[in-house]
Image (spheres, helix red, strand yellow):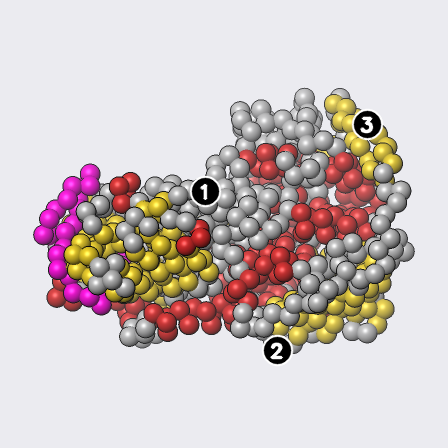
């Protein structure tokens, strides 16, 4: 390699940038394709590893996931617990004991859980306290699939299994020969009740644990039915006080114990369901979703549910790990937001409102942070699951009606987490993508309220913090006590663009023009001396001293080198501000080629996102967090698409593996996975609400998208392989194709996109002015 050192002077700080230029490259003209793997639709679950990302802790995230045993978007998930009740890292891959298998609704360790309770089997001396009852286990005696979980509880010689439905689960505990076999139901802390009904072989009760975002009357009602008679029943009360031969307990933290004798190999089945509405609804959920089904039948239904959704995308490759990573990521995309609705006795959709505590008709979804998921998860739903997204949009309209505001981070109700006004791009993109059944007027009213009403917000993350300043000055000032002000300004400007797009499509021209103008507010933070975004004081002066490596402060979980690119809707406008395409591409190069230096003084310690950037050997590129994940695709706008192709392929094959340490940062409700799924297909939605996907480098030899409208869109990459990331030429539906983007409509219409791949970049492909993706500034010049 030839090495060229340059220096970038950024506001008085000189940063050395190392640019690496290839002077030679392996001339691999032979295809790397070996025998291709064409998985059948009946075996896709075999490629999914729910343990991907579970090797994580507070200091370093390799995903911050847990194995979610669930159906797609299910109301309840189930997961084994290696950690204590209340620990957000409920399953740590390197821990050695299991305390139980719990119902969970946790979307992130940082948000934590709600409505959790667990089941556990023990034998011999009765142990029910969570530390004492924990059993040693081995991953070698553990089977983990989305539709099924099994583990050998070595201390008790018991095999515990569970398979899920949307609102219920079927357990099977296989015991040794013993006179002392027990199953425990732990109602958890923060308020619980249990009642054992021996004559019905049933335990009913409720749990009330939560981490915020719930009304005063919040309960999760559960019912557990057993197929074996109880020979004893105990409960425990607060402070783990054992209450022998009792059948009911209520308090801060209570639980139930049932016991019996078992033969070796005897399987005891437990059918469990819950409801946020009532005990009667919990029983209805159980009867409907499991009823008299056997364990095998329940599992078969869960398997079928997953195969149906995973099978909508079929890929072929010679690399088995790429298949495993792809379908493991796709599994994560299909978990959140969860269905927070139930079907009443008349089979009508109803939900308990986590906003006002009432039981109301209609859909509700929850457990989602829009700061993460507006980028790729919801565009993926619009592409592959528009019917689902129609229901989610109804849920957003219901949230607005029930709380007066749209959610930005819901779990289950409003949570004060993250920044932005990202409900707007989610709603606008659904509308512009043609998702049917939307209440456009209510949803538009709701996103306009976010942009115009400063008061009455239930938490700081809802609406827009600093709105008065933003609407008066065009930015949120650095020196008025509002943290992450520059990041807020950039995200509000993009949200304003998406409002304008939706208003325009609805024929509201005056409203659209107003918000198009506001969408240019990003320019107010651009510092021409550093060519970076920078916090600005109320008096119009830039914040000083300025360190572009400083995380936090004016930015959110990132620094200026990460957030400068958050002009999703007007990359050409940013190119113009920087002085042209060559300068812009050089700034992009600099992020990758500089050392992974950082300033963590705002936090007072090195947060995990910083550490994840530092250790990846990709300079200051921080793929483990969302603000920069689209940045690689911006070379397309600067007429250097081959750099996008190379770096996309590098991230796909270096930063993701189907292993417990398989992510390079928080997975975040499907977003980091959705980046992989889109990018592996060969394109990515850089700017939702523009109806475009920006091209990268397809990972697979072939991918077929089976769309809900009945059409199929096929992506083929001839000559693809490890050393062939570069697009030599392309054809769309048989015609020569030279653009670095395709429209969402093109995909929905079905057809084929063909790439010829090679080991060297074709610097003549995709470099014309017309080849560049959408930018708002270009539309102004037309």
Q: Is the residue 347 above or below the residue 502 in the image?
A: below
Name the residue carrying label 2: 710
Q: Is residue 130 visible?
A: yes
Residue under label 3: 7
Q: Residue 152's image quarter?
A: bottom left
Q: Is residue 430 visible?
A: no
Q: Image quarter for residue 282?
A: bottom left
Where residue 638 appears, as percent x and y from the top left, is 82, 48
- Earlier along the polypeptide chain: callout 2 or callout 3? 3
Circle 1 residue = 94
Q: Identify which residue is drawn at 57% across, 70% down.
A: 311
Between disc 1 and disc 3, whose residue precedes? Answer: 3
Magenta segment boundaries in residue numbering: 219-246
Q: Is residue 231 left or right of residue 672?
A: left
Percent of width and height locating residue 602:
56, 26
State the CA–CA distance, disc 1 to disc 3. Answer: 43 Å
Element under label 1? loop
CB atoms of marks 2 and 3 within 8 Å = no
């Amino acid at each position: 390699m030839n090495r060229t050192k340059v220096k970038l002077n950024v506001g008085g700080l000189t940063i050395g940038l190392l640019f690496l230029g290839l002077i030679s490259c392996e001339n691999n003209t032979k295809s790397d394709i070996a025998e291709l793997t064409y998985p059948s639709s009946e075996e896709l679950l075999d490629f999914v590893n729910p343990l991907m990302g579970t090797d994580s802790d507070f200091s370093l995230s390799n995903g911050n996931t847990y194995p979610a045993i669930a159906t797609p978007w299910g109301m309840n998930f189930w997961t084994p617990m290696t950690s204590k009740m209340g620990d957000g890292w409920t399953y740590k891959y390197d821990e050695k004991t299991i305390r139980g298998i719990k119902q969970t609704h946790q979307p992130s360790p940082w948000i934590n859980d709600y409505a959790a309770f667990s089941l556990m089997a023990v034998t011999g001396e009765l142990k029910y306290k969570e530390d004492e009852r924990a059993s040693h286990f081995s991953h070698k005696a553990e089977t983990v699939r989305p539709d099924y979980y099994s583990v050998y509880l070595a201390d008790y010689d018991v095999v515990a299994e569970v398979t899920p439905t949307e609102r219920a689960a079927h357990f099977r505990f296989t015991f040794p020969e013993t006179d002392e076999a027990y199953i425990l139901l732990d109602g958890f802390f923060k308020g619980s009740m249990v009642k054992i009904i021996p004559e019905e072989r049933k335990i009913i009760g409720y749990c009330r644990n939560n981490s915020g975002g719930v009304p005063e009357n919040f309960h999760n009602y559960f019912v557990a039915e057993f197929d074996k008679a109880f020979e004893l029943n105990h409960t425990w009360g607060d402070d783990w006080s054992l209450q022998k031969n009792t059948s009911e307990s209520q308090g801060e933290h209570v639980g139930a114990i049932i016991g019996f004798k078992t033969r070796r190999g005897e399987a005891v089945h437990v059918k469990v369901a819950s409801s946020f509405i009532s005990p009667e609804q919990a029983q209805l959920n159980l009867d409907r979703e499991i009823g008299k089904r056997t364990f095998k039948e329940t599992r078969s239904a869960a398997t079928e549910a997953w195969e149906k959704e995973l099978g909508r995308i079929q890929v072929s490759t010679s690399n088995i790990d790429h298949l495993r990573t792809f379908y493991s990521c796709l599994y994560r995309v299909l978990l959140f937001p969860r269905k927070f609705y139930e079907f009443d006795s008349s089979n009508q959709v109803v939900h308990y409102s986590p906003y006002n505590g009432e039981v109301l008709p209609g859909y509700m979804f929850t457990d989602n942070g829009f700061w993460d998921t507006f980028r790729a998860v919801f565009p993926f739903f619009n592409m592959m699951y528009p019917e689902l997204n129609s229901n989610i949009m109804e849920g957003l309209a219901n949230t607005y009606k029930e709380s007066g505001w749209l959610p930005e981070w819901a779990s289950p109700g409003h949570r004060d987490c993250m920044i932005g006004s990202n409900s707007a791009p989610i709603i606008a993109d659904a509308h512009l993508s043609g998702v049917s059944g939307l209440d456009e007027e209510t949803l538009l009213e709701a996103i306009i309220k976010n942009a115009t009403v400063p008061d009455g917000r239930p938490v700081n993350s809802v609406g827009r913090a600093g709105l008065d300043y933003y609407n008066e000055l065009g930015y949120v000032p650095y020196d008025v006590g509002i943290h992450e002000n520059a990041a807020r300004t950039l995200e509000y400007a993009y949200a304003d663009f998406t409002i304008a797009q939706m208003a325009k499509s609805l024929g509201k021209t005056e409203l659209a023009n107003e918000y198009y103008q506001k969408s240019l507010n990003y320019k107010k933070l651009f510092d021409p001396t550093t060519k970076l975004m920078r916090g600005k004081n109320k008096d119009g002066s830039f914040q000083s001293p300025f360190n572009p490596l400083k995380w936090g402060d004016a930015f959110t979980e990132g620094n200026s080198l990460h957030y400068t690119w958050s002009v999703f809707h007007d990359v050409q406008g940013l190119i113009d501000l920087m002085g042209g395409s060559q300068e812009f591409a050089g700034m992009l190069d600099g992020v990758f080629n500089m050392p992974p230096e950082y300033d963590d003084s705002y936090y007072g310690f090195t947060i995990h996102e910083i550490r994840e950037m530092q250790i990846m050997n990709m300079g200051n590129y921080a793929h483990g967090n969302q603000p920069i994940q689209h940045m690689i695709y911006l070379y397309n706008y600067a007429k250097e698409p081959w750099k996008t192709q190379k770096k996309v392929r590098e991230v796909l094959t270096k930063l993701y593996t189907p292993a417990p340490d398989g992510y390079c940062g928080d997975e975040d409700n499907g977003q980091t996975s959705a980046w992989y799924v889109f990018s592996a297909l060969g394109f990515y939605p850089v700017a939702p609400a523009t109806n475009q996907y920006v091209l990268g480098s397809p990972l697979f030899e072939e991918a077929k998208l089976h769309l809900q409208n009945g059409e199929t869109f096929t992506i083929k990459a001839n000559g693809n392989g490890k050393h062939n990331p570069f697009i030599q030429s392309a054809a769309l539906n048989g015609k020569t194709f030279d653009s670095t983007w395709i429209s969402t409509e093109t995909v929905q219409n079905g057809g084929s996109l063909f790439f010829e791949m090679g080991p060297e970049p074709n610097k003549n492909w995709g470099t014309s002015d017309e080849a560049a993706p959408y930018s708002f500034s270009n539309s102004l010049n037309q």
